[in-house]
Image (tube, rainbow, N blue to C red):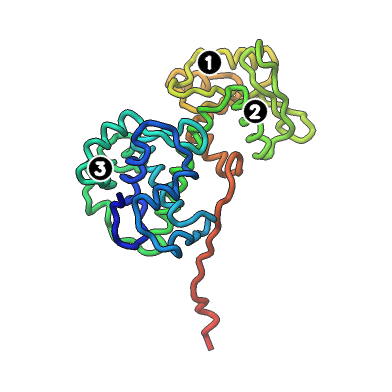
């Protein structure tokens, strides 16, 4: 049964309920495979609208469905059981039952979930007027770009946390090479004494830097981890080190690093994904836009 009778391309927020409703049985679904099914089951679109392509190469409907999935995911209502798939969560099932009467989910409904508020960086005491301030076209572009970047950072850190710990160590070494450091050397997977890799600070390898990578999902790096890292640096007589984690560092760990006689740089999860985006590691450019304006000098006689 279609919930939209008019021939009109739905906005992404109008796809929130249909998508959640379609996957309500708890099974895993390929997002790519169900896109057209959801489109045809819940919406009456013309053939031309079904075939409309946007700049990223997807159909407009599929692009909006992907954003609907992202918003549901940030609210904890769906999850990615594996790459390219979507599955409703227990929280999503409970929430959906409450929405079956209206058959509609609004953005303000998602704002009842703390994790979504964190994703949107919305203050709990902000008013609707604050959220709907009039913006210039350029401000809207900047705001949209910022939303895309925030979503990318969130998905990227999740991918890193899901990766194999040994592969994560290799990702970090690849990042440093992208940043302009010299060749890297991986250490043995056991008995490395707190060292995951060695990178050359310069092309000739005159100076070297020890690296340590901790793929933590929830726990922060503590003082013990830093102490082991510093000990390995002392044993190897290398005075510079970089410690990277997908989480963050507790106060004792930060203090331990700052008081070390060796130079130790701490990179947390937020900084890590920023560097990966900056140096295009693990991501790809989807589309580019040019903004043009009148050349006033051209019209001066």
Q: Residues within 10 Å of mark 3 (few under 14, many from 20)?
A: few
Which is nearer the eye, 87 or 208?
87
**What residue does disc 1 label?**
225
Whole-angstrom CA distance, mark 2 to mark 1, is: 19 Å
Q: Position of residue 199 (x, y in %)?
A: 70, 28
**What residue does disc 2 label?**
170
- Disc with the residue nearer the chain's start (3 vs 2): 3
Residue furthest to the bottom in view is 301
Whole-angstrom CA distance, mark 3 to mark 2, is: 41 Å
- Disc with the residue nearer the chain's start (2 vs 1): 2
- Residue at left offset 31%, top offset 39%: 117
| Residue 234 appears in the picture as rendered | no
**What residue does disc 3 label?**
109
Dividing the picture into quadrants, the one containing residue 175 is top right
Q: Position of residue 123 (x, y in %)?
A: 27, 42
Which is nearer the eye, 290 or 293?
290
> In the picture provided, is 113 more to the left or to the right than 52?
left
Callout 1: SS: helix
Q: Is residue 28 above or below residue 148?
A: above
Q: Residues within 10 Å of mark 1 (few under 14, many from 20)?
A: some
Residue furthest to the front in view is 1
Q: Is residue 30 above or below residue 46?
A: above
- Residue at left offset 34%, top offset 35%: 24
Whole-angstrom CA distance, mark 3 to mark 1, is: 41 Å
Dividing the picture into quadrants, the one containing residue 100 is top left
């Amino acid at each position: 049964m279609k919930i939209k009778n008019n021939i009109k391309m739905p906005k992404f927020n109008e796809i929130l309920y249909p998508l959640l409703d379609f996957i309500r049985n708890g099974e895993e679904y390929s997002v790519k495979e169900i896109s057209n099914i959801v489109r045809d089951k819940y919406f009456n679109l013309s053939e031309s609208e079904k075939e409309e392509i946007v700049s990223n190469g997807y159909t407009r409907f599929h692009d909006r469905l992907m954003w609907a999935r992202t918003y549901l995911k940030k609210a904890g209502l769906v999850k990615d059981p594996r790459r390219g798939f979507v599955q409703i969560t227990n929280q999503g099932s409970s929430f959906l039952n409450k929405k079956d009467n209206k058959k509609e989910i609004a953005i303000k409904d998602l704002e009842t979930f703390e994790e979504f508020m964190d994703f949107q960086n919305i203050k709990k005491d902000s008013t609707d007027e604050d959220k709907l301030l009039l913006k210039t076209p350029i401000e809207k572009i900047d705001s949209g770009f910022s939303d895309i970047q925030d979503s990318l950072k969130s998905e990227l850190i999740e991918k890193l946390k899901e990766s194999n710990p040994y592969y994560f160590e290799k990702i970090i070494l690849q990042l440093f090479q992208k940043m302009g450091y010299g060749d890297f050397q991986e250490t043995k997977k056991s008995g490395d004494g707190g060292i995951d890799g060695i990178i050359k600070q310069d092309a000739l390898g005159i100076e070297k830097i020890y690296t340590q990578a901790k793929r933590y999902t929830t726990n922060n790096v503590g003082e013990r981890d830093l102490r082991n890292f510093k000990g390995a640096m002392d044993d190897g007589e290398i005075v510079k080190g970089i410690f990277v984690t997908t989480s963050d560092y507790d106060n004792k760990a930060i203090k331990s690093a700052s008081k070390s006689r060796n130079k130790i740089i701490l990179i947390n999860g937020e900084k890590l994904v920023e560097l990966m985006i900056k140096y295009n590691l693990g991501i790809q450019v989807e589309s580019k836009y040019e903004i043009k304006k009148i050349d006033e000098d051209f019209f001066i006689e």
